[in-house]
Image (tube, rainbow, N blue to C red):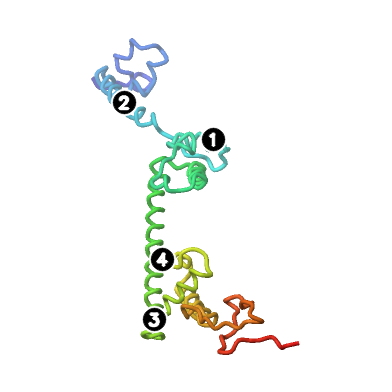
């Protein structure tokens, strides 16, 4: 039924609103519906949308204000899914790290507000980067050593194997630890420099001769007073103290 104008020229509310409380009889949000059916259909549509929106907003986390307090920030990060304690983070490779390193990393994750999933992703990325760096470093050292060895072989020619053996023997006699492991942390130029120095020392101290010459200088028949490393060159005639 079309809405009719009353004597004053205003619209007459539809008849179905007559049974509503007085405050609602003139409410335009209600009187715009010509029939009860229209009103009911609109109500159902709005109610359905409201339920859907309420469900979506149930897990809604409002934006954190810029001037948020530490307590507000903590509650906000917890709501995002941050573990309650740093120790709850688990990341790949932590069993190979020192405990203090793990603790430091987990505290940094927690302070940044990372979720367990985010922390795991960053941990995997970090491990991948470190692996690439180590592999690149080892490849560089390997290539440098190969180039340095080629150069050394060119300098020494057929004496290369002999000189390397002399260097090892010199180190094993006067150095500490295994010869090959002793220079693991050194660069290839340092290693080659050490090897050359060992060969020179071996020659200067007599370590390049085995067995040592038996003709050692003596004083009044007493055994050679010089340590092996400081022994003067052997002579064919023994020293004899002047007669008093």
The answer to whether 115 is drawn above or below residue 184 in the figure is above
Q: Callout 1 environment at 10 Å: few (<14), some (14 to 19), or many (20+)? A: few
Task: Compare residues 122 and 175 and report the one nearer the observer.
Answer: 175
Q: Which callout, 4 or 1, points at the residue further toward the start of the chain?
A: 1
Q: Total of numbered circles in the picture?
A: 4
- Helix, strand or loop under label 1: helix
Residue on which disc 4 sits: 137
Q: Which residue is mark 2?
A: 46
The residues tagged by marks 3 and 4 sit, at their Cα atoms, a distance apart of: 27 Å
Looking at the rendered image, the quarter that the C terminus falls into is bottom right
Distance (Cα) linking label 4 and label 1? 45 Å
**Tag nearer the camera, 1 or 2:** 1
| Mark toward the start of the polypeptide (1 vs 2) | 2
Which residue matches tag 1? 72
| Camera-nearest label, 4 or 1 | 4
Q: Residue at x 50, y 48 (%)?
A: 101
């Amino acid at each position: 039924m079309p809405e009719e104008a009353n004597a004053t020229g205003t619209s007459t509310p539809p008849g179905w609103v007559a049974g509503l409380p007085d405050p609602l009889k003139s409410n335009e949000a209600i009187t715009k519906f010509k029939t009860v059916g229209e009103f009911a259909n609109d109500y159902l549509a709005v109610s359905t949308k409201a339920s859907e929106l309420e469900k979506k907003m149930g897990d809604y986390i409002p934006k954190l204000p810029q001037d948020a307090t530490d307590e507000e920030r903590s509650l906000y990060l917890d709501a995002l899914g941050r573990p309650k304690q740093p120790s709850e983070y688990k990341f790949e490779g932590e069993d190979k790290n020192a405990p203090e390193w793990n603790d430091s990393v987990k505290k940094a994750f927690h302070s940044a507000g990372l979720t367990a999933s985010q922390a795991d992703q960053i941990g995997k990325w970090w491990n991948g980067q470190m692996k690439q760096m180590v592999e690149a470093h080892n490849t560089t050292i390997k290539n440098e050593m190969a180039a340095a060895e080629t150069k050394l072989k060119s300098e020494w020619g057929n004496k290369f194997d002999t000189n390397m053996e002399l260097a090892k023997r010199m180190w094993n006699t006067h150095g500490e630890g295994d010869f090959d492991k002793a220079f693991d942390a050194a660069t290839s130029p340092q290693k080659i420099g050490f090897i050359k120095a060992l060969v020179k020392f071996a020659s200067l101290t007599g370590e390049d001769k085995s067995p040592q010459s038996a003709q050692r200088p003596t004083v009044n028949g007493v055994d050679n007073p010089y340590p092996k490393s400081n022994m003067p060159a052997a002579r064919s005639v023994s020293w004899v103290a002047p007669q008093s």
